[in-house]
Image: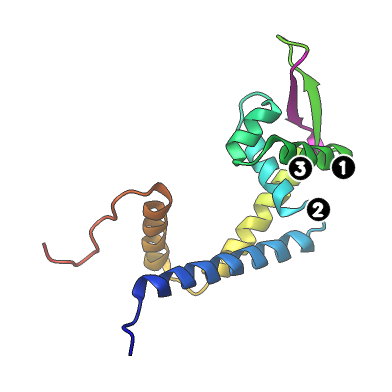
């Protein structure tokens, strides 16, 4: 008989939760009929974090994808009027990507869809549980040491 593998169980739970989150977010996006794929959604959210329009290479680096993937995403978003390519004022050979008004409106809808999905996912948790989950997720995302559990003796 083999001993239970707690880390294996946690890994499986994380993968199942990730799939559930993606499924729920996708459903909320489809309900809003924005015509944006999850990958395009991620690019729009990333684009919104820049103070000035970034280069395609900057987006590829931030998204951790190859530049060709960004080109394909930008092509689709440009065709739907959500982003536009603009020349760099300092170097006309460089092209930058900026959100259009329609892109900003889509981004607002995307944020609302993500909030609705988060509310659905987190509905079973109370306030303290949500706070604890947030702390644990920060620990996992940042890769830092977990804070001591409440009520644990030293």
Task: State which region is magenta.
Answer: 93-102
Residue 75, percent from left and from top = 83, 38
Q: Which residue is mark 2?
A: 34
Identify the image quadrant of the C terminus. bottom left
> Among all residues in the image, which is located at the extreme left?
154
Q: For the residues marked 2 and 3, what is the alpha-carbon distance in whole angstroms?
A: 10 Å
Q: Residue at x 81, y 30 (%)?
A: 84
Task: Locate residue 106, reporting x and y percent.
Answer: 76, 45
Q: CA distance from mark 2 to mark 1?
A: 10 Å
Check disc 1 and report the residue beneath it: 80
CA gap, disc 1 and disc 3: 13 Å
Q: Which residue is mark 3?
A: 105
Residue 31 in percent (x, y) is at 78, 63
Residue 13 placed where, x, y %?
47, 72
Which label sits in the foreground, 2 or 1? 1
Circle 1: is it few (<14), some (14-19), or many (20+) Cα within 10 Å? some
Taking the image as shown, residue 122 lies to the left or right of residue 112, namely left
**Screen quadrant of the N terminus:** bottom left
Furthest-front residue in this view? 1
Mark 2 and mark 1 in contact? Answer it, CB < 8 Å.
Answer: no
Dot 2 alpha-carbon crowd within 10 angstroms: few under 14, some 14 to 19, many 20 or more: few
């Amino acid at each position: 008989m083999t001993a239970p593998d707690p880390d294996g169980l946690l890994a499986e739970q994380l993968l199942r939760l990730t799939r559930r989150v993606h499924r729920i977010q996708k459903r909320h996006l489809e309900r809003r009929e924005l015509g944006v794929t999850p990958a395009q959604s991620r690019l729009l959210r990333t684009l919104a974090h820049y103070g000035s329009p970034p280069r395609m290479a900057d987006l590829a680096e931030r998204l951790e994808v190859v530049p060709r993937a960004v080109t394909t995403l930008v092509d689709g978003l440009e065709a739907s009027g959500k982003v536009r390519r603009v020349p760099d004022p300092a170097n006309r050979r460089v092209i930058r990507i900026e959100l259009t008004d329609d892109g900003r409106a889509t981004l607002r809808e995307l944020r609302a869809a993500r909030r609705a999905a988060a509310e659905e996912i987190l509905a079973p948790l109370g306030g303290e549980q949500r706070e604890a989950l947030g702390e644990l997720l920060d620990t996992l995302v940042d890769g830092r040491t977990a804070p001591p559990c409440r009520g644990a003796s030293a």
